[in-house]
Amino acid sequence: MNSEISILLASYNGERYIEQQLLSLIGQTYKEWQLYVRDDGSKDETVTIVRRYEKMDNRIHLVTDEQGSLGCIGNFLALLPYSKTAYTIFCDQDDFWLENKLEVLWKTMKRRRQDVPQLVYCNAYSYNMEDGVGQPEIAYAIQSLPDMLFRCGGVQGCSSLFNDKLKKLVLQYHGVTIMHDFTVTFLAVLFGEITFIDKPLMLYRQHECNVTGIRPKSLLQIALNFWKDNKRKGILNCKTFETMKQITACFCDQISNENLKLLDDFFEFPNLSRLQMLNFVLKNHCTLYSKTYPILLKILTRKLWDNHTTFL
């Protein structure tokens, strides 16, 4: 049987964790996959470990090129052209996939229509060495454009399986991006369908080197984090806002009139009064973490832009 899934793993100084992740991939109940690993210039034994497993399993491939160090985003995007299969999934070097993860994502994807871009994603358990496996991460369903406008990131890439239609859209875009998985999610919202599986299918490792963190799990935590962040964070994130503008410009002739009108209005958001901002959110049913009130609170208590964020 031909492989249907390409797994894209971007590695960098991951010797402490990558072997466990490779073993979790080999142990998947769904076997028809190919793994492509690109290392971004590790100074430890990461490449040695990957090469050892490459010799053991002919589905594992270490990618070599002359592009040098590209950073996290560039490393993942450099792997995307290597996917020649019907479906693609990104893979973090320090997570651990439960044995049925690919099978559940694949079976769900196969039930979706394939003539439009499709993205299927799952929940995860948080995990750290001190506390072990924690409660499931609070993941939130994203269904439409109003669910994306005030997010700083997209659906976590390592939880998402996407089809060839969506992959081709991502490959068409060469502009700036806040994160590779934001680009994938935003394009799925604009042109396709997103399916959320509210079931933890992986362990998301929490440690000091994580690029992204897990969301707070209680209303108290959310409230405390919100007030703590008020001084340094704004209503909008500069990088995310610019990413959306550039993606919209790239695909403007393909975006539906309804979505294009909403985006055009949103790009005027920084010029609105606070009262007009509140009206925009309520009128367009915008959400953050599946709720409207976090956006309203931001508008009432924060400055417009993040203090710590500049795009270039």
Image (cartoon, rainbow, N blue to C red):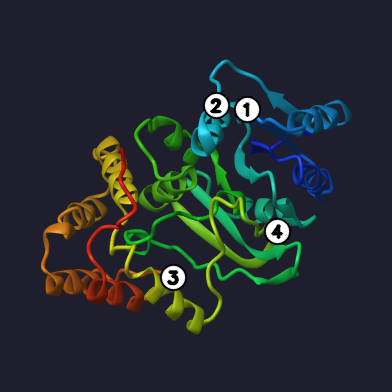
Q: State the mark number for residue 289.
A: 3
Whole-number angstrom distance, CA of label 1 to CA of label 2: 6 Å
Q: State the mark number for residue 69.
A: 2
Can you name the residue that lies furthest to the top here?
66
The answer to which of marks 3 and 4 sits earlier in the sequence is 4
Circle 1 residue: 41
Q: Quadrant of residue 6?
A: top right
Residue, x 49% and y 57% (percent of image)? 194
Whole-number angstrom distance, CA of label 4 to CA of label 2: 28 Å
Given contact means CB atoms under 8 Å apart, are the residues at marks 3 and 2 in contact?
no
Whole-number angstrom distance, CA of label 3 to CA of label 2: 34 Å
Residue placed most toward the observer, 85 or 53: 53
Residue, x 23% and y 53% (percent of image)? 263
Circle 4 residue: 202
SS for callout 3: loop
Whole-number angstrom distance, CA of label 3 to CA of label 4: 20 Å
Which quadrant, please, contains the C terminus?
A: top left
Which quadrant, please, contains the N terminus?
A: top right
Question: Mark 3, residues whose alpha carbon is within 10 Å: few (<14), some, or many (≥20)?
Answer: some
Residue placed most toward the observer, 72 or 190: 72
Given contact means CB atoms under 8 Å apart, are the residues at marks 1 and 2 in contact?
yes
The answer to which of marks 1 and 4 sits earlier in the sequence is 1
Whole-number angstrom distance, CA of label 1 to CA of label 4: 26 Å
